[in-house]
Amino acid sequence: MTIDEIKKVLLEIIQDIDDEADLENLNPADALRDQLDLDSMDFLDIVMELRKRYQIQIPEADYPQLATLDSCVNYLIPRLKAA
């Protein structure tokens, strides 16, 4: 998958979890939780949806690497290369 495809998937997942999320003004370098008011369950829903769609395991120790849209993309690039 390309960087743009990964971003699109992440934004789709976020939109599915929170249909009122303001994705238009999302700064890819700022924390998603702060910008979108995501709670722990929302964050876990994102992780679980990635697991369901792409059969990737994201260990809890790696969760801090998923803080921003940019860091999510960087983390997922090698894991979704074949997808």
Image (cartoon, helix red, strand yellow):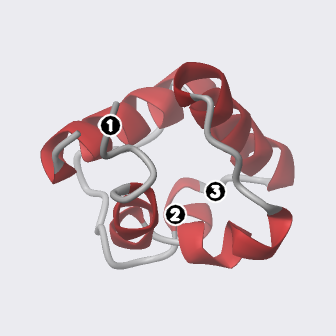
Q: Secondary structure at mark 2?
A: helix
- Comparing marks 3 and 2, which lies closer to the viewer? 2
Quarter of the picture containing the C terminus is: top left
Q: Residue beneath label 2, please? A: 32
What residue do we see at 80% from left, 74% from top?
Answer: 61
What residue do we see at 50% from left, 36% from top?
Answer: 14
In percent of width and height, residue 74 lies at 35, 69
Q: Cα distance, mark 3 to mark 1? A: 32 Å
What type is the residue that disc 3 sits on? Answer: Asp
Q: Secondary structure at mark 1?
A: loop
Residue in the foreground of this view, choosing between 13 and 80: 80
What type is the residue that disc 2 sits on? Answer: Leu
Residue 53 location, quadrant: top right
Q: Cα distance, mark 3 to mark 2? A: 8 Å
Label 3 with label 1: CB-CB less than 8 Å: no
Q: Residue beneath label 3, please? A: 37
Q: Looking at the picture, does residue 70 appear above or below residue 30?
A: above
| Mark 2, other Cα within 10 Å: few <14 / some 14–19 / many ≥20 | many
First in residue order: circle 3 vs circle 2: 2
In percent of width and height, residue 1 lies at 23, 39
Q: Looking at the picture, does residue 27 appear above or below residue 79?
A: below
Count of numbered tags: 3
Q: Residue beneath label 1, please? A: 82
Q: Looking at the picture, does residue 62 appear above or below residue 9?
A: below
Q: Is residue 31 left or right of residue 49?
A: left
